[in-house]
Image (spheres, coloured by chain):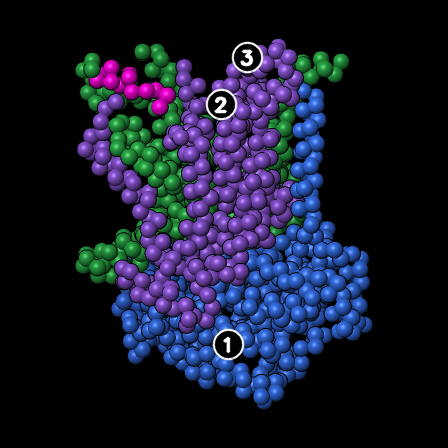
Amino acid sequence: MKRIRRGALRFSLLVMTALAVLACGDRGAADPGDAAAFREAFLAGRLSWTEVEERAAREGEVEFYHWGGSEALNSWMETSARPDIERYDIRLNLRRSDTRDVVDLILADMATGRGPGEGTVDMVWINGENFRTLKDNDALFGSFAALLPNSRYFALDPDDPASSVNLFDFGTPTELMEMPWAAFQYTFRIDTERVRPEDVPRTFAQLEEWMRANPGRFAYVAPPHYIGTTFVQTLMYEKNPDGTRYEPFLQDPADLGRGEFIRLVKPAFEYLRRLEPYLLGGGGTEGRRGSPVYPATAGALQSRFVGGEVDFDMEFGVFDVDRDIRSGVYPESVRNIIFPESGMITDKSFLAIPWNAPNPAAALVAVNALSSPASHLSKLADIGYAPGLDLPLLDPEDQESFRQAAPDLHGVTAEELAKHEAPNVNARFVDVIDAIWMTYVAERSEREFEEIVADAWDSVVR
Amino acid sequence: MRRVSVTGRLFLVVMLLAFAFPFLPLLVASFSFRWHWPALLPTQWLWDARETTPFPVGWDYLFSPISGLGPAFLNTVVIGVVTALLAVVLSLPAARVLARYTFRGKGVVEFFLLVPVIVPQIAVGMGMLLLFMRIGIARTYVGIILAHLVPAIPYAVRILTSVFQNLDPRYEEQARTLGSGWLSTFRRIVLPMVLPGVTTAFLFSFLISANIFLLTFLISGGRLQTLPTMLFSHIESGAPLDATTAGLVLIVSVPGLVFLMISDWLTGDHAALGRTSFGSRSKKERP
Amino acid sequence: MSRNFFRDRRVVIFLGLAPAVGTLLFLFVGPLLVALVQSLGHAPIYRVHRFPTLEFHRQVLFSTRFRIAAVVTLYYALVPTFLATLLGVALAVTFSRRVRGKRFLSFFFRLPLVVPYLVGAAMVVALFANGGLIARLLYAAGLIESTGQFPRILFSAGGWGIMLVYLFKQVPFTFIIVTAVLSGVGPEYEEAARTLGASRMQAFRFVLLPRIMPGVVTSSLLVFAFNFQSYEIPYLLGATFPATLPVEALRRFNVPDLTRRPEAMAYVVAITVISGIVLFAYLRLYRRWERSRGGVG
């Protein structure tokens, strides 16, 4: 029996060792102290780009976390991003994950004492409140954007008004801690088989009329999904009683003040409540709420749109229609529309590097590789992601190839879209909007609107 | 034995349809390219659209390196096999003791070894994530495997206990009185007799591991994908009759199908699955 | 000495139990304790140092959101438990008779059991969505004119979509456990009862049911315990509001503000306690029933 026990012991030790190897095998090999020194030297501008590339090749791999819900994007990552990055002897490890989870991962690593070179994430596709959370927690690598060779294709000069979309992310100053990567405009789509273009509403007021005439044919994504939050923001702009649209929402909540905020957003939230009976699953007539359906994700709304349940779809990305028709997601009769005329939110999303990135040099080289005109061009041509770089800074030749590569806009023109651009709200409002929506609209709380906002405000702004 | 009545037969057919039919639309959908309301069948099939899509879709997508299906499948299998091995190894001694000995507090031990099955996994998972972060195994294979052991061990103990209950200890004693050493007794007598049961325990633990979603989701934090976590993100963001999701559903069903076929072939007994898990316990409990 | 040591009964028992019990102590009791301690305000990892406080529990337990969530969670868990038990027992009893193609049938009756719940979710969406296949069939047959006329099964407070997935998985589960018990009972008792003049219903109630009851209790207990804590199905197929307890818990776990994590922990502690109370009450009820039956018969 003793012999057996010892054998079992040895076996379990073997298993444990194997597991330990499995666990540690994927740890970056870089020496942490070394990574901290590298970070400092690079940010101080003491390293040449060749030195960065050499170190990157030594690090040998990069952990790139990105939202993986798009087959188109996943394809592009594999066919375009991978060869572009692996050219520098860096293996690209693509990790598909919800951005919120990535933020959590980075902060958890920090909380358990993992410093520079000891984290898990090298680079992440990010924007908005997720970026702000990282920034507020000092979890970012530093002001690297202008130090990359390809930064010459981006307007990063604070004195140039064209730079503001690159230097502010939902109102948060990026301080060059993230690199612009793609530009998106929030667009609504219709199926012309079901809605005639001449019946298309152009304002939320007209949408209300349309919904009353066609009850149960409209739905919007539930906040806190960003597609849902953006819908509410867009509505807030039009219903702003001062007619100043987005302007008051660009500042920090603390500067705007709670009372003023309540006054500015109340009409929008009343609109949302008033329209509940006419939403998908609503009661159909005035005062009968029914059980309105709020799809939890953009994909869930899209599936109802192509499933014939609702007549409007909404997403970030003006070229989506073209791509989704070609890949069979949309019927061929789907078109973009200009809605609402009060402003279609336009923003950029970025690539950021965490403070404790295990392979910081490789991350820098990878971000630089994905910032080249060629990379942005293929992203536009292959999957319809509008470029994050600034076309006026390119050679005329390159500018022309971007114009050539731009997919069809199906129903709208680039001029119309540009005319109706609007910026995003300050990131600090996002959680407040989500909390109000959850209590006032989804939960349909009996309490006064002012009281609900006060609660949401106090728990988030503090 | 009584013949089944007409209503009974009708009932069986309805149930058969309810369990088997839902796989059919997914099979059709997995080969579709355009299938929008109100079409009853796809208006365009995958093979007609392959040349014109900007990137692979449906099965083409799943079987391209882009989808990550390969690594997810491999992760599922590796995690499942290691989990099952560990579960069996850890449970064997306990099962033998529970089957052979009566001792004070046995009821408590039996209860304790059963509780993980009924305690909310979300509670275990959230606490476990923090614990694992502390010791640095969150988001690793080790972490996920250890997490999977929690639901796997109770089943393995259950199955193996009934195996030892059916094994008469006198065989061992006899072999040993006839001069056989411990090791050779184990190899020649015990092992052949428990092997089918051990295999069942292994397969069952594997199946449990391969089907776990929440624990993997919490512990892996998106860093490691398994088939269920991959399917989750596709259902979350996909259309109901989306070709890729439909194909993935069929693939995710493969481990279960294989399990069912192996266990039928091993035991030749369609009720084995129930008896080896909790049915036997209930029988024993009868007053 | 060592040889005797390993012959000692107590040592054998202890060493035998140690691996399984020890592993579960670490992997199962440990995390539960972590959750409990965090819910009481000790979470240095998120810079929460308020141990011991009942503040987070109070915050959670006294909110309307929690109470509504608790009610719908119980509802979504209990209805399918009841229906799955009913259908599963009926299926097992019917199946225990002489049936042609038993192996074939049994294969498909067990198929849902061996696939993840997520597979069931995908099927329910494909079939029962308002733009799904069944709605399309009704549309083609001229019974409905638009998707809006099809009953709302998914994503509504009624939770029918969630319950359908549970049934898809749990009728087979009940079936298999009861079948296993039945195969140990054998047909003789029931046939004897019928020969002695009992009606089919009487034979079932007085002869078969008492024998399969332990199996029925075990399976329904496990089914309820699962349903009550399931996350992915109510998350994918439930309404935005009301959401179930696990969905609310993970929503709180996922807010970017990490200092609010103890709230999520208070939720999971509550889930564990409520589930425990229900299961305990159910077992007590069963024991009483068994005792009363013992007293009469």
Q: Can you give x and y, in whole percent of width and height, for residue B3 in the image?
A: 22, 27
As drawn, which residue projects farthest toward the bottom? Answer: A396
Q: At 57% across and 44% down in the image, what residue appears? A: B78
Label total for image: 3
Left/right placement of residue C154 relative to residue A58 reads: left
- Vertical position of residue B185 compared to residue A37: above or below: above
Q: Point out which mark residue A381 bears.
A: 1
Q: Is residue A91 visible?
A: yes
C-alpha distance separating marks 2 and 1: 63 Å
Q: At 55% across and 12% down in the image, what residue appears? A: B170
Dots 1, 3 in contact, CB < 8 A: no
Q: Point out which mark residue B162 bears.
A: 2
Q: Report which colour depicts chain B.
A: purple
Q: At 70% across and 77% down in the image, what residue appears? A: A149
Q: To which chain does the residue with label 2 belong?
A: B
Dots 2, 1 in contact, CB < 8 A: no
Q: Point out which mark residue B170 bears.
A: 3
Judged from the image, the secondary structure of the residue bearing numbered disc 3 is helix
For disc 2, the neighbor class at 10 Å (few under 14, some 14 to 19, many from 20) is many
Judged from the image, the secondary structure of the residue bearing numbered disc 2 is helix
Q: Can you give x and y, in whole percent of width and height, for residue B138 in the image?
A: 63, 46
Instruction: Output the letter for the chain in green.
Output: C
Q: Point out which mark residue A261 bears.
A: none
Q: Say whether residue C274 is magenta.
A: no
Q: Earlier in the sequence, mark 3 or mark 2?
A: 2
Does mark 3 fall on the same chain as mark 1?
no
Q: To which chain does the residue with label 3 belong?
A: B
